[in-house]
Image (spheres, helix red, strand yellow):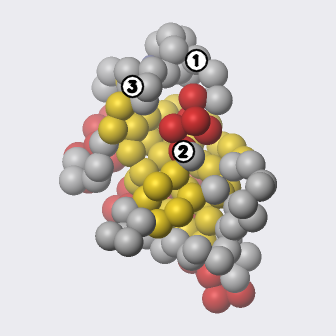
Amino acid sequence: MSNREADGSFVSSAPDVLSSIGPCPICKRELSGHSYSLLASEVVDRKSGQESLITFFESLKNRDWKRLLKAGNWEGLSDNVELYGIVCGGAVVLVVIRSPFELYDDDEILLVETVAEEDSRLLLGLAKDKTWKTLK
Ligand SMILES: [Zn+2]
């Protein structure tokens, strides 16, 4: 469940969901203290949104970061998928969450994937202007 504040920024339960993936897949320690950012988002289940959702997952699979980071669609009255990046050392853990419109539905983790350091470097270079926060 995510909301958008008046200024357009996200108020998301993401930190809780991210913490629920357990220890960091890279360093095997607690995720608290790791930096994370919302990298991209896309709308689910709207007919006109299908094409962009396919593009979203294809870009992710193909490590097409430029294309992926352009995905910034978000619809308050639909389910959304959100891509988060968690940084550990020189590598990134990608977490894709399905954030339901329904208030009482839980966010669902669709994918947790570690990106190789070289790809991570490219991704972090492109995402340096995103808002990075620290997991508590
Ligand atoms: Zn770690």
- Quadrant that contains the C terminus: top left
For the residues labelled 2 and 1, the Cα–Cα distance comes to 16 Å
Distance of mark 3 from mark 2, alpha carbons?
Answer: 14 Å
Name the residue carrying label 2. 14
**Residue picked out by circle 1:** 23
Number of the label disc, if any, that sits on residue 62: none
Q: Does the residue labelled 3 lie within 8 Å of ligand 1?
A: yes
Q: Using a 10 Å C-alpha cutoff, classify the residue at mark 1 as few (fewer than 14 neighbours), some (14 to 19) or many (20 or more).
A: some
Question: Disc 3 marks which amino acid?
Answer: His
Q: Does the residue labelled 1 lie within 8 Å of ligand 1?
A: yes
Mark nearer the N terminus (2 vs 1): 2
Quarter of the image where the N terminus is located? bottom right
Mark 1 or mark 3, which is nearer the start of the sequence? Answer: 1
Q: What label does residue 34 carry, if any? A: 3
Q: Give amino acid for label 2.
A: Ala
Look at the numbered disc 3 and give the secondary structure of its residue. Answer: loop
Seen at 48% across and 34% down, the residue is 93
Q: Earlier in the sequence, mark 3 or mark 2?
A: 2
Q: Which amino acid does label 1 sit on?
A: Pro
4 sits left or right of 23 in the view: left
Front in this rendered view, residue 85 or 54: 85
Please report the residue visible at 64 percent of the width from the left and 29 percent of the height from the top: 20
- Identify whether 50 is placed above or below 84: below
**Disc 2 versus disc 1: nearer the observer:** 2
- Work out whether residue 57 can be spotted: no
**Tag 2–tag 1 contact (CB < 8 Å):** no
Label 2 residue SS: helix
Q: How many labels does the image show?
A: 3
Q: Say few, some or many: other residues with alpha carbon within 10 Å of mark 3 (under 14 / 14 to 19 / 20 or more).
A: some
Residue 32 higher or lower than 74, as above or below: above
